[in-house]
Amino acid sequence: MPLVAHNDLPTFERLHQEGLTVLSADRAVHQEIRELHIGLLNMMPDAALEATERQFFRLVGESNPIAQFYVHPFTLDSLPRGVKGRAHIERYYEPFEKIRAEGLDALIITGANVTHPDLAQEPFWEPLIEVIDWAMENVTSTLCSCLATHAVMQFRYGQTRVKQPAKIWGVFPHRVVEKRHPLVGDVNTRFDVPHSRWNDISRAQFEAAGLHVLVESETAGVHLAVSPDGLRAVFFQGHPEYDTISLLKEYKRDLLLHAQGQLEAPPPFPANYLKPREQAILQEYAARLLAAVKRGEAAPEFPERLILPRLDNTWHDTAEAVVGNWMGCVYQVTHRDRRIPFMEGIDPDDPLELGWRRGV
């Protein structure tokens, strides 16, 4: 059901123009639909800040017809920002102190760019721990995306991510391995998920931490796992929120970095993403780009308009379904008694005995 535009964040208007239902705050107060308040801790760098907003706002807004969604973006002061990023955050984002005081029904934590092999050396480390510790005690469910999953696995479960010999990059087929869990109810048993990461938390590591794997890929590894109770913490290693063009933008970024001498090797093509014609176009562009840089000329125009119409999105519908199930689970738990921050009377040895199975 609808997102509620409770401030003038441009993302609301952008999604409305795309056709998503977005209510003004004035209209929302006259609706007979329950509110859910979802926090978005956006740790992405300035260049991806607004795109990441739109991706997660879109998934939440498309997800479920039973609630009005108030999404509250915030970030960490310790993350480096440029002038544009700081201005956007100061105008549209909420301070964590306000989020903590007013409370949330659910929380999404995005990935982040890192500069150290050890995540504990990153500037966001201690502030992120503060947010996570608060959320685990006060928020019904927290969804961690990619790098956030790796950070939480390290500081809460003692499982450190492992650098892979090659980047896990592209669109990979996955299989549901625990079909009984409500998060994957009525979801295709096989579906695609984009990934973009050098590091991995293995199934053995998730299980050693007492977590439960729901979705995995033979090639890309675990995508979706949950905490022992089944809902308190939800972990993504992939990027189901990605737009169709997201991997192409990453390829363009890395190719330009290579041309500028900041990456030793040119980027490979993302797996299972580009057809032979599009690969040939990009190979020809890469040759022209390197020649232009060698001559001291400006980079030629990137051939996005030739490639984008032929890219397929094979993941968004399933991402929407999983997030819809997540919102439904959060709704059912919090709807029973909003004074109770989480579930009571759950058998800790049965993560699927959540008391909110569909039909209960």
Image (cartoon, rainbow, N blue to C red):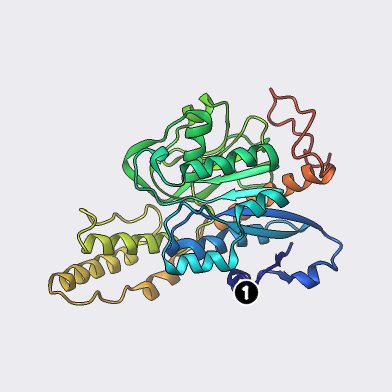
Residue 174 visible in the current orientation = no
Q: Position of residue 260 (x, y in %)?
A: 21, 63
Residue visible at 67% across and 61% down in the picture: 61
Q: Which residue is mark 1?
A: 13
Left or right for 316, reference 257: right
On screen, residue 260 above or below 153: below
User: Relative to the observer, which residue lies in front, 249 or 74?
Assistant: 74
Q: Quadrant for residue 80, please give it.
A: bottom left
On screen, residue 23 above or below 325: below
On screen, residue 85 above or below 38: below
Residue visible at 72% across and 59% down in the picture: 69
Q: Position of residue 249 (x, y in %)?
A: 39, 64
Secondary structure type for disc 1:
helix
User: Relative to the observer, which residue lies in front, 42 or 23?
Assistant: 42
User: In this view, which residue lies farthest toward the left?
Assistant: 295
User: In this view, which residue lies farthest toward the top?
Assistant: 349
User: Relative to the observer, which residue lies in front, 256 or 337?
Assistant: 337
Q: Quadrant for residue 58, please give it.
A: bottom right
Residue 267 visible in the current orientation = yes
Residue visible at 75% across and 69% down in the picture: 25
The number of numbered discs placed on residues in the rendered structure image is: 1
Left or right for 242, reference 294: right
